[in-house]
């Protein structure tokens, strides 16, 4: 991998220095914010991007996020209109296949079809295509590409910059949504075997410590509700519930 560009190293640096949330949640949120602004702003004037938004569109969460910003309702209406026109064309073809089913043709419930050895029905195929369309999302796709690049930049820095392992060790804990994802990137992209084993061990040990600490702190949090412990100190437990939810769900979902 080449020396990474500043457009990637600066956000990675910021993500590791902030202390509020998982560095990957931070990077996700920042990139998501940029893209939401982009799709409600400059992208509207670019015919090639409009072709993409018409064809791919957004996932349920990102349609909502675009709407909730209330930044450019006309812009969103334009995207929605041309996307809907595209979907209508596509879905009219799909839906016409099941809009006038002959009795008995494809209408047997799945359970009965399976018993009689028949395979998927037209109905199942239509449902599958619509579901695939619903989860397709330009914002999710572009976030995923950039997140992978950020993770690769971290791996490059871990191998090539002496201060980086310490910086990573001192950063905020990685949430449980991003931990297995980061492991997968390390597993596929980190070629240097020494760095690879050191980093994986470091991350695994750290996760084990987080779990052990959460266990102790959550237990004490629940015990504090017992009137006999009322005058005992909280130790580290006061924010244990918040920390546990951040750990399992990532900070993003609490906003
Ligand atoms: Zn995270
Ligand atoms: Zn999405």
Image (cartoon, helix red, strand yellow):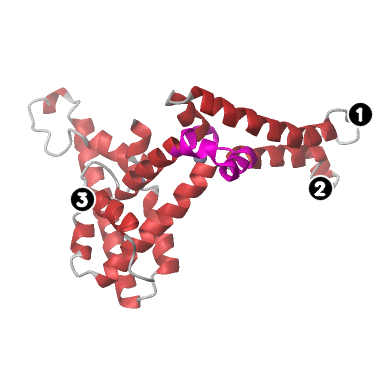
Q: Do the residues bearing badges 3 and 2 touch, measured as CB atoms within 8 Å?
A: no
Q: Residue 119 location, x and y as percent?
A: 81, 47
Q: CA distance from mark 3 to mark 1?
A: 64 Å
> Which residue is drawn at the image coordinates 33% and 55% (left, top)?
7
Residue situated in front as seen by the camera: 179 or 220: 179
Question: Residue 129 lies in what quarter of the image?
Answer: top right
The location of residue 59, given as percent across then percent down, is 55, 37
Secondary structure at numbered mark 3: helix
Residue 119 got which mark? Answer: 2
* Residues in magenta, as a range: 38-61
Q: Is residue 119 above or below residue 88?
A: below
Label 3 sits on residue:
17
Instruction: Please give left or right for residue 104 compared with residue 181 in the image.
Output: right
Residue closer to the observer: 214 or 79? 79
Residue 53 image-quadrant placement: top right
- Whether residue 24 is visible: yes
**Residue at the disc numbered 1:** 103
Q: Is residue 200 visible?
A: no
């Amino acid at each position: 991998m080449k020396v990474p560009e500043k457009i990637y190293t600066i956000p990675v640096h910021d993500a590791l220095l902030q202390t509020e949330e998982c560095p990957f949640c931070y990077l996700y949120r920042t990139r998501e914010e940029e893209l939401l602004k982009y799709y409600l702003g400059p992208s509207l004037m670019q015919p090639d991007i409009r072709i993409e938004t018409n064809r791919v569109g957004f996932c349920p969460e990102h349609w909502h996020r675009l709407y909730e910003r209330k930044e450019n309702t006309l812009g969103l209406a334009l995207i929605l209109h041309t996307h809907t026109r595209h979907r209508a064309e596509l879905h009219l073809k799909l839906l016409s296949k099941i809009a006038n089913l002959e009795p008995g043709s494809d209408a047997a419930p799945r359970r009965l079809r399976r018993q009689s050895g028949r395979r998927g029905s037209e109905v199942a195929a239509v449902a599958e295509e619509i579901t695939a369309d619903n989860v397709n999302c330009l914002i999710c796709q572009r976030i995923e590409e950039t997140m992978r690049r950020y993770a690769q930049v971290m791996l490059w820095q871990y191998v090539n910059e002496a201060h980086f392992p310490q910086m990573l060790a001192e950063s905020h804990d990685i949430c449980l949504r991003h931990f297995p994802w980061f492991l997968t990137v390390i597993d596929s992209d980190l070629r240097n075997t020494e760095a690879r084993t050191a980093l994986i061990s470091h991350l695994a040990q750290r996760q084990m410590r987080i779990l052990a600490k959460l266990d102790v702190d959550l237990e004490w949090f629940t015990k504090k509700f017992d009137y006999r412990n009322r005058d005992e100190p909280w130790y580290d437990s006061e924010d244990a519930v918040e920390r546990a939810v951040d750990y399992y769900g990532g900070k993003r979902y609490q906003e």
